[in-house]
Amino acid sequence: MRYEPIKEIVVRDWARLTSPEDLARMVAVAAAGHAVSVSWAEGVAFAAYPLSGERFSKALIEEAKLYYAAIYFALMPNFHPVIETKDGIRVPVVNLSSSLVAKKIATWLKDRETR
């Protein structure tokens, strides 16, 4: 067995939402009734939508490149297992703080915040 880390993450679009609750609403609406969750790392809650298909699978396998169509995020300094909105939407949050990819994404998103 060997570990081969992702060498590059390509993000086509990103947007910061004003709160974790707004992120939960957006993710729930986009999921249209399907199961959904939000990821969390480094004080950032985010929903990442990877590009799929043969071209992107090949890039992942051959070049260790990961492509995302979009990543939406909100700052959430502390981990909470569920984001619940005032209108009753409940979205589970997955703590990915041990994932190097999730940590890179969260750090990159926070850097966008300061620009």
Image (spheres, helix red, strand yellow):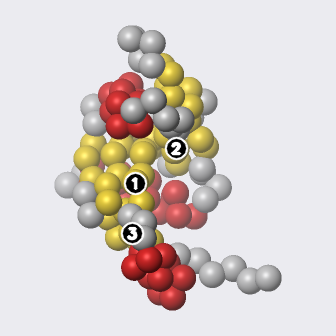
As displayed, is residue 113 above or below residue 74?
Answer: below
Q: How far apart are marks 2 and 1 (CA)?
A: 14 Å
Q: Do the residues labelled 2 and 1 touch (CB within 8 Å)?
A: no
Q: How far apart are marks 3 and 2 (CA)?
A: 19 Å
The amino acid marked with disc number 3 is: Tyr
Q: Where is residue 11 in the image (x, y as percent from the top left)?
A: 32, 64
Position of 112 compared to 4: left or right?
A: left
Task: Tell me the residue that label 3 is attached to.
Answer: 67
The residue that mark 2 highlights is 40
Lower sequence index among marks 3 and 1 = 1
Q: Residue furthest left?
A: 115
Q: What residue type is labelled 1?
A: Tyr
Whether 88 is drawn above or below 21: the answer is above
Above or below: residue 79 compared with residue 112 = above
> Mark 2 against mark 1, which lies toward the viewer?
1
Q: In the drawing, what numbered circle is on residue 49?
A: 1
Judging from the image, what secondary structure is the residue with disc 3 in?
strand
Q: In this view, does 26 lie to the left or right of 85?
A: left
If the image is split into quadrants, where does the C terminus sit? bottom left
